[in-house]
Image (spheres, rainbow, N blue to C red):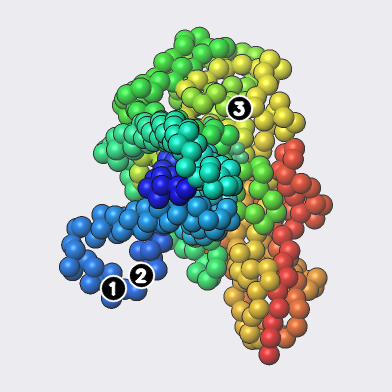
Amino acid sequence: MTTPRGAWLLSGVLAGLAGLATSHAAAMLLTIRATPVVAIGEMVIRLTPGPVVELAIRTLGQRDKPVLMGGIFVLTFLAFAWTGMLARRSWWAPLLVYVALAAIAAVAVLWRPGAMGLDVFPVVIGFVTWVIALSVLTDPWQRMQHHVVNEEDRNRPDIATSSRRSFLGRTALVGAATLAFGLVGNAFGRGRREVEETRRLLKLPITRHAAFAGTSVGVDGVEPWRTPNGDFYRIHTALVVPSIAPKDWELRIHGLVDRELTLSYQDLLDREITEAWITLNCVSNSVGGDLIGNAWWSGVRLATLLEEAGVQPGADAVLQTSHDGWNCGTPLAALTDDRNSMLAIGMNGVPLPIDHGFPVRTVVPGLYGYVSACKWVVEMEVTRFDQIEAFWTQRGWSERGPVKLASRIDAPRGGDDLDAGTIRIGGSAWAQHTGVKLVEYSLDEGPWIEAGLGRVPNVDTWVQWVAELEVEPGDHTLAVRATDANGNTQTSDEAPPEPNGATGWHTIEFEVSE
Ligand SMILES: Nc1nc2c(c(=O)[nH]1)N[C@H]1C(S)=C(S)[C@@H](COP(=O)(O)O)O[C@H]1N2
Ligand SMILES: [Mo]
């Protein structure tokens, strides 16, 4: 007896859709911007030769993207139907198709600018769903094929009927689950899309960054002095990033204060806006690492707000709490002295991106993010360090997190193979809120030589360094160290990031050929 073709086709298509639904839901829940299918679309656009793109735009006009996405959906649809047909004869053939589809999606997702390892997670979820759903759906027919061993059985209607019944039940189940995941993904996506739309339409009383000349030393391979928002490192513990509309945002300042303050977003806009270049970095950054970025921040000074609230004697900390429940304890002094600690609403001249804390986050020059840069901040309790524990201090990180003096080589990169002759080397150095006075480099453990420095607008940003040097064929090592404005030189002692920031000289190896 033969099993119905249509049922195999349907199984393949439904299993495929189920995988798309779970991967989409996973992407939305993790707020990964592109679902795998969209990422594939973007990859196709990037791979398509220019003339073809132009031809497509000329003939299709505005419809080019819908046509592309439609084409991708049709092809995946056919591939899914095919997996169903393949499942009829073998268990491994559909698996191969799934592996191929998942591999394409993984490459597409990871190839996006600013992609992170976690971005492949939805692809993995989709793949697992495909395998499970296909086996669940085709199981009744597989059994029927295997159990029908002798000729008489072939015509036993009871076997066919029970297989059909079992298949229909499973189809309904998988179909319902697919629909549910589709709806979940859609709902989460919509919440974020709406806030994103509100954010996009916001007109804030902030300036685009004031261009500050001379900050860049103009060496190829050195990270730009101003980090574009899309390239700014992102660190948070939230799996689902809060989507908060400005009208729903409120900050309560309370604790050891004379007057409690409750601020709305509009209250912030009505105040004087302060703008400044501030370099933010993560305590988890390893020597030479890239968990650091520099932006033009716009916001309201915290010193003014805390003065209004009237801080009481004895307080030395502010426990900040995010909408997502994360918290941090910040030294009160860093929020009330003359530095530009602020409740930021703008980043590089646009409303704070959602992933960077929209609508409001804290920025404190000179402290690592884990003790200060609370995103989606909704509560500030003026208190004492001996009364509190915060998210990272509970996990063994230091109570206070002043940024350590550090420097980095961006060009050349470790492992580069260069031509003999003159090369330009460079990178950056930072000692937020103290300032960097001197950067030196040493080639092949030779003497320390002073590098040139770019200009900086204040002591709260990183500074670029540059040098020109002659290199001869062979293997080389290059090290860098900085000295801060107080005359302290970076220690060569190597310390890991935990518990309060890495130390050591960034040292790289490169090769020079004839
Ligand atoms: N709500 C919330 N805020 C947070 C964090 C977090 O996990 N949750 N991480 C902190 C850490 S460790 C750093 S280094 C900075 C990173 O800010 P960014 O993602 O805008 O670069 O945010 C800080 N603020
Ligand atoms: Mo961090």
Nearest the viewer among 47 and 263 is 47
Q: In percent of the image, x 45 and y 36: which residue is there?
A: 157
Using the rendered image of the protein, determine whether residue 339 is visible from the camera's viewpoint. no
Which mark identifies residue 328?
3
Q: Quadrant of residue 419?
A: bottom right
Furthest toward the bottom, the residue is 514
Where 324 falls versus 22 (above or below)?
A: above
Nearest the viewer among 447 and 74 is 74
Q: Earlier in the sequence, mark 2 or mark 3?
A: 2
The residues bearing labels 1 and 2 have C-alpha atoms spaced at a distance of 7 Å
Q: In percent of the image, x 43 and y 44: which residue is there?
A: 11
- Amino acid carrying mark 1 in the image: Val
Which mark identifies residue 176?
none
Q: Which residue is mark 2?
A: 48
| Residue 490 spot, x, y in % from top left | 74, 53
Q: Which residue is mark 1?
A: 52
Determine whether the residue tagged by mark 1 lies in a helix, strand or loop.
helix
Q: In percent of the image, x 76 and y 54: which residue is there?
A: 504
| Residue 446 spot, x, y in % from top left | 80, 73
- Amino acid carrying mark 3 in the image: Cys
Image quadrant of ligand 1 equals top right
Determine whether the residue tagged by mark 2 lies in a helix, strand or loop.
loop
Using the rendered image of the protein, determine whether residue 429 is visible from the camera's viewpoint. yes
The residue at label 3 has a CB less than 8 Å from ligand 1: yes
